Image (cartoon, helix red, strand yellow):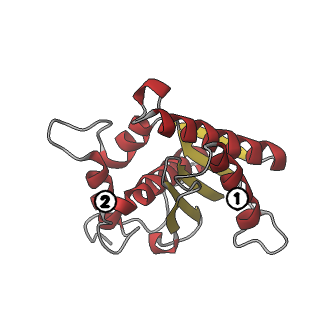
Amino acid sequence: MFSVGLDLATTTGIAIGDSRINHPSQIKSLSMRFRKPHEDFEMAGYNIERWLEQAFIGPLPLYQTPDIIIAEAMLPLAGQKSDDAGKVALSLHQGLYNFCYAYGIRLERVAASTVRKYFIGQGKAQPGQDIKLLVAQHCQRLGYTEYVLPKAKRDQTDAIACWSFGVAKFARVTPGGVLMMGAL
């Protein structure tokens, strides 16, 4: 099952891979901003929709068409960092929905706490903990990244966690080649 994991935010994390791949290092992860600070918030939705079309559907797609896209569910508007962040999140989710609807791609939205509970064993941070750092460290331990990604790139590790959760839940397979602590 070819899957895409997304952490939709001002900086969007993207994880792309096939659940049948036998090694986590084959999962492609990146982060992108779909809106420049001076642009209207609607541009985020438009840009993500165009990027998804070019990456997966276009005349020369970079990747095969996904069977499923697993996206981290949007925080309620009251929980957003700012009014602008809430508008961008709405726009990104609408652009993603438009893309999936237009091309018949399955879209699953999952709560961040559910993904983290699956991936690192706890849904929310304890006092004094950086939950994104814990996810980044776990990605490095499992072999998804070569090193713990810096703070600016941690949306990628959230996307990897979404991808891994989606593969386990919807493809019903453990991501291939994942080894804990050097086990064989």
Q: Quadrant of residue 149?
A: bottom left
- Mark 1–mark 2 Cα distance, whole angstroms, equals 25 Å
Measured along the vertical axis of the image, is residue 37 above or below residue 20?
above
> Any mark on residue 52, and which?
1
Give the mark count. 2
SS at mark 2 in the image: helix
Q: Horizontally, is 35 left or right of 180 in the view?
A: right
Q: Horizontally, is 170 left or right of 79 in the view?
A: right
Residue name at image x 60 percent, y 36 percent: 90
Q: Horizontally, is 154 left or right of 5 in the view?
A: left
* Placement of the N terminus among the 4 image quadrants: bottom right
Q: Are marks 1 and 2 in contact (CB under 8 Å)?
A: no
SS at mark 1 in the image: helix
Q: Say what amino acid the circle numbered 2 marks.
A: Lys
Location of residue 3 in the rendering, given as x and y in whole percent from the top left corner: 62, 57
Location of residue 102 in the rendering, given as x and y in whole percent from the top left corner: 83, 46
Residue lying furthest front: 38
Residue name at image x 32 percent, y 53 percent: 135
Mark 2: give few (<14), some (14-19) or many (20+) Cα within 10 Å: few
Residue 160 vs residue 119, the one in the foreground: 160
Measured along the vertical axis of the image, is residue 61 above or below residue 1?
below
Residue lying furthest left: 128
Residue lying furthest top: 78
Give the mark nearer the N terminus: 1 vs 2. Answer: 1
Tag 2 residue:
151
Q: Say what amino acid the circle numbered 1 marks.
A: Leu
* Placement of the C terminus among the 4 image quadrants: bottom left
Mark 1: give few (<14), some (14-19) or many (20+) Cα within 10 Å: some
